Structure formats: structure tokens, C-alpha cells
Image (cartoon, grey):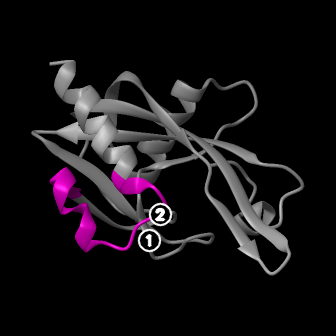
Amino acid sequence: MSEDGPQDRLYPPRPILAASVAVFRQGRVLVGRRARPPMAGRFSLPGGVVEVGETLVEAAARELREEVGVECAIIGFNRHVEPIVREGGRVRAHFVVASFVGRWTRGEARVSKEIDAVAWIEPEALGALLTTPELAEVIASAARIESASR
């Protein structure tokens, strides 16, 4: 993660570019519970802000390694999401997240400063968790891409 802290991402002057990855292992997808604002306490895909000079794929792979200690082979682009959190008349957070699909290659999922809980879950079991916006749709789409690429 860059030196910018979570406070630097609140009330941004423009949308912040980020990348995430839905990693599959034996039919299950890896999710983590966000430990920091915005959306702390919600489950999401591992991911984070793209650094200058880094491609989206490189950012997704780096954030996966840094946040949960897992590596994967990226098999394709999934879709983008734009979580926007409004507070009164202001925009508290606005991210544009490019989401990829990957297959686990190594590493055992662990917690970090950004992620305080991890789980490999069946994609259809997501409904039992408090999640970031659109996560169910992102994972359903990623599961179709992963399945079709086998």
C-alpha cells in the first residue's frame, strides 16, 4: 500500500483508481473484511489503489499479496464498479475499481492492516455477509468467467 493513509482518500477532489481480484480456489472465492474506512466492516475482494507507473493487473496482484498473502494467475478482466459514498451534499469517497478474475497459485490467506478477517466462500454464500456495493454481482460474473476458462 502506498504511504497515503485512509484519511487521504476521504472527500477526494476526483475519483480514485483502484484494482481488485476475485481469486478462486477449488470453486471458492476469497473475500476479506475491510479494516479501514471507507466501508470498514464490510466484506470485499482484496484490492487497492493503483500506484503511478503500475498497470491495473500489476496493482491487483500486488494488493492481493500485500493484503492477504495470496498469489494468483490473472485469467481475465471482469468489470468495473464505482462505489460512491455521499455524506450530506458532499462525496465522502469515490473509487473506480477495475475488477479481475484469478486462480489461486500459492499462499495461505491471512489478515493485515487493511483486512481483519478472510474467508474462502462458495460464491452463492455471499448473501450471509455484509458486503461492499455490487459485490454479489461482481463475484457472480467472476465465477462465470472462471468456470468458462477451465
Q: Is residue 105 visible?
A: yes
Task: Give the image location of residue 108, x and y in percent.
Answer: 23, 48
Q: Is residue 131 left or right of residue 147?
A: right
Q: Is residue 69 visible?
A: no
Rendered image quadrant of residue 126:
bottom left
Magenta segment boundaries in residue numbering: 120-136
Residue on which the image places disc 1: 42
Task: Give the image location of residue 35, x and y in percent.
Answer: 50, 72
Taking the magenta stretch, the answer to whether it contains residue 127 is yes
Rendered image quadrant of residue 147:
top left
Q: Amino acid at mark 1?
A: Arg
Residue on which the image places disc 2: 132
The residue depicted at 72 percent of the width and 63 percent of the height is 93
- Looking at the rendered structure, the secondary structure element under dot 2 is loop
Q: Is residue 143 above or below residue 37?
A: above
Q: Is residue 109 left or right of residue 66?
A: left
Q: Determine the residue located farthest toward the right in the rendered image.
A: 13
